Image (cartoon, rainbow, N blue to C red):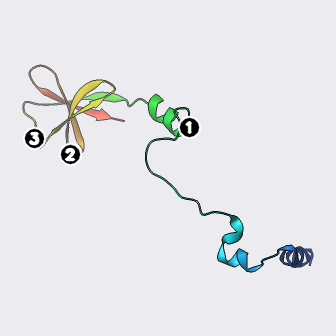
Amino acid sequence: MIGLAVLAFAIAAEPDPMSWITGSALGEPVEARVGRPATPVSAAGVARRTTRRVVRRSAVYVSTLPAGCATVTINGAGYYQCGATYYEYTGTQYVVVIIE
């Protein structure tokens, strides 16, 4: 009963009750933007710059890379990405690495 009284008061106090239905009572529409953070101290930018990826070597070695591999840099070191698998050159062969 109290809830109905509060709702009736809110509708009566609103100069344009239809604005709640159309959404214009909430102000300007909000837009999401994809890209760099607005400032260098924003939370998204700090998390991105301070998160380091863990790279662990496995016991799997190969003598040649599969076709279509791309060179990538992770934590300042060079690796080869072949699909979902990463390799590190060890001088004479390549070791499969796990990136976390």
Alpha carbon separation for disc pair 1 and 2: 31 Å
Whether residue 1 is situated above or below residue 29 in the rendered picture = below
Q: Give the residue number, with chain letter if any, for mark 1.
A: 43
Q: How far across and down, in percent of the image, does residue 59 sit?
A: 21, 29
Q: Give the residue number, with chain letter if any, for mark 3.
A: 66
Mark 3 or 1, closer to the camera: 1
Q: Which mark is residue 83?
A: 2
Whether residue 21 is situated above or below residue 54 in the rendered picture = below
**Mark positioned earlier in the residue sequence (1 or 2):** 1
Labels 3 & 1 near each other (Cβ < 8 A): no
Q: Secondary structure at mark 3?
A: loop
Labels 3 & 2 near each other (Cβ < 8 A): yes
The kind of residue on which mark 2 rests is Gly
Q: How far across and down, in percent of the image, does residue 39 sit?
A: 53, 36
**Mark positioned earlier in the residue sequence (3 or 1):** 1
Residue pictured at 56% horizontal, 37% vertical: 43
| Image quadrant where residue 9 sits | bottom right
Location of the C terminus by quadrant is top left
The kind of residue on which mark 1 rests is Ala
Alpha carbon separation for disc pair 3 and 1: 39 Å
Location of the N terminus by quadrant is bottom right
Q: Nearer the viewer, residue 52 or 16?
A: 16
Q: Secondary structure at mark 1?
A: helix
The kind of residue on which mark 3 rests is Pro
Total labels: the figure holds: 3
Q: How far across and down, in percent of the image, does residue 25 sit?
A: 71, 69
Alpha carbon separation for disc pair 3 and 2: 9 Å
Left or right: where does residue 61 sit relative to residue 11?
A: left
Left or right: where does residue 94 sit relative to residue 16?
A: left
